Amino acid sequence: MNCPMEDRNPEKLVAYAAGELDRETAAAIERHLSVCPACRSLAAEQAALWNTLDIWEAPPVSSEFDRRLYRRIRDEVRLSWWERLSRPFRPMPLRQALPLGAAACLLVIASFLVQQPDKLAPVQPSSEVVQADQVERTLDDLELLRQFGTANQAETPPFDTM
């Protein structure tokens, strides 16, 4: 028999602990449990769980239970779709809402910081080597543009006013 835990099939062990297996399968699992400590542990835990559930007794239902249940169902049916939708968002006291909102904001901010830490790091200034002749050519180009702008203004006729 293959190990149910290695096959990722613990349902057989649960069914064994619940007593739902036929004799042949139960005997095969018992043989496997004698050599596999992981399955033996899971089967023992499941058997303890089933024994506890067998011992447990549900508390008695109150005599008013049915009446209250049917009243809640009736009241729920009478609610409009908007009331059903907005019920979870009804205003809670500010004393409770403020810490919850602050915690939610902190979580959102933390998630952004974790996802993109490089965007918040300071940018290192780049040190470019500038050649003296490059600066001189740039200044000459600026002077040429300035001369071109003053020559263009002198050729433009003034606006006629009517």
Image: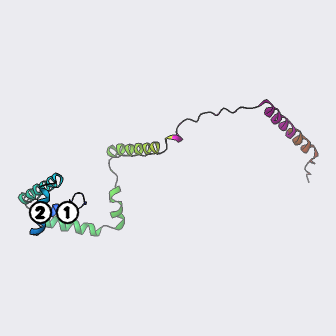
Q: Quadrant of residue 27?
A: bottom left
Magenta segment: 118-145
Across and down, in percent, residue 123 comes to: 58, 36
Question: Which of the two residues, 118 or 88, is positioned nearer the viewer here?
Answer: 118
Residue 59 disc label = none
- Secondary structure, mark 2, is helix
Amino acid bearing label 2: Ala
Q: Residues within 10 Å of mark 2 (few under 14, many from 20)?
A: some
**Is residue 122 inside the magenta stretch?**
yes
Q: Residue furthest top?
A: 132
Label 1 vs 2, first from the N-terminus: 1
Question: Which of the two residues, 19 or 4, is positioned nearer the viewer here?
Answer: 4
Across and down, in percent, residue 36 comes to: 16, 54
Q: Tell me the CA gap for discs 1 and 2.
A: 10 Å
Q: Residue at x 20, y 63 (%)?
A: 11
Q: Quadrant of residue 131?
A: top right
Q: Residues within 10 Å of mark 1 (few under 14, many from 20)?
A: few
- In the image, is 162 to the left or to the right of 48? right
Quickly name the residue at label 2. 18
Quickly name the residue at label 1. 11
Question: Which of the two residues, 29 or 49, is positioned nearer the viewer here?
Answer: 29
- In the image, is 44 to the left or to the right of 119? left
Across and down, in percent, residue 14 comes to: 16, 61
Q: What quarter of the picture does the C terminus occupy? A: bottom right
**Is residue 61 inside the magenta stretch?**
no
Q: How is the image coloured?
A: rainbow
Across and down, in percent, residue 98 comes to: 36, 44
Q: Residue at x 79, y 34 (%)?
A: 134
Decide if residue 21 is in sight here: no
Q: What quarter of the picture does the N terminus occupy? A: bottom left
Amino acid bearing label 1: Glu
Decide if residue 103 is in sight here: yes
